[in-house]
Image (cartoon, rainbow, N blue to C red):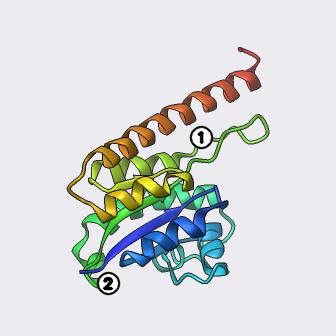
Amino acid sequence: MTQNVLVSSSIKEGLPELVSEIAQRGHEVLSFGGSADTLSGAGLTVTDIEAQYLGVGPDSPWADASALERRAELGRFVLPRLRDDPAVLAELGNSAIQVAVISLRNPTLENPRLDEGGLAYIAAALNGGRLVVTHPDQIGLVCSVLDHPARTRSRMQLIYEAEERMQQHTSRWVRAVAALRGTT
């Protein structure tokens, strides 16, 4: 059975190299938006899940939504179906998502929005026992886990780093909102 890697990353530097390494280990690439464009531009074969599962296009109700809003929708509602819905899995050739490459957008004073979609992706992937990669610099850890599944140290390090990045993201968001309100 083919395994899938789901990619949704605001960090593009090093992303094609990371995903290429994962794809070379027999994983098909699922992505959307800028991540899909970056990976396709690097010559990787990508299934666009945004078009497939949200029906995003010029006539779609999602056509005017921001990328962050579409990502939130995919993270909250579509990702669990990609993991658990037999019809969706059959559509994907009974493939499961084994690896999720997800980076969180940093909230700033100019754009203090919480990356709900990214947080939802990471939480759903961790809860589903998926391998979660939160930054392209983790290429060595993810390759170690894929090459030697019985070893747990690298997998545990990835879990720890994913949880730490979720906490850091939420803390940055709280600080950005507090600064906007003048309550820092």
Name the residue located 29 percent from the left edge and 48 percent from the top edge: 127
Q: Do the residues labelled 1 and 2 touch (CB within 8 Å)?
A: no
Query: What x and y, as percent, mark residue 28?
Result: 41, 78
Name the residue located 47 percent from the left edge and 59 percent from the top edge: 101
Q: Alpha-carbon distance for marks 1 and 2?
A: 32 Å
Where, by quadrant of the figure, is residue 61 drawn?
A: bottom right
Front position in the image: 39 or 90: 39
Name the residue located 62 percent from the left edge and 55 percent from the top edge: 68
Local packing at callout 2 (Cα closer than 10 Å; few below 14, some 14-19, many 20+) is few
Q: What element carries label 1?
A: loop
Query: What x and y, as percent, mark residue 39?
Result: 60, 74
* Quadrant of the image containing the N terminus: bottom left
Q: Which amino acid does label 2 sit on?
A: Glu
Q: Is mark 2 on a helix, strand or loop?
A: helix
Q: Residue under circle 1? A: 114
Query: What x and y, as percent, mark residue 70?
Result: 57, 62
* Quadrant of the image containing the C terminus: top right
In this view, 145 is above or below 177: below
Where, by quadrant of the figure, is residue 156 drawn?
A: top left
- Disc number for residue 176: none
Upstream in sequence: badge 1 or badge 2: 2
Q: Residue under circle 2? A: 91
Q: In this view, does 27 lie to the left or right of 138?
A: left
Q: Is residue 115 left or right of residue 147?
A: right
In this view, 68 is above or below 33: above
Q: Which amino acid does label 1 sit on?
A: Leu
Where, by quadrant of the figure, is residue 56 drawn?
A: bottom right
In this view, 174 is above or below 119: above
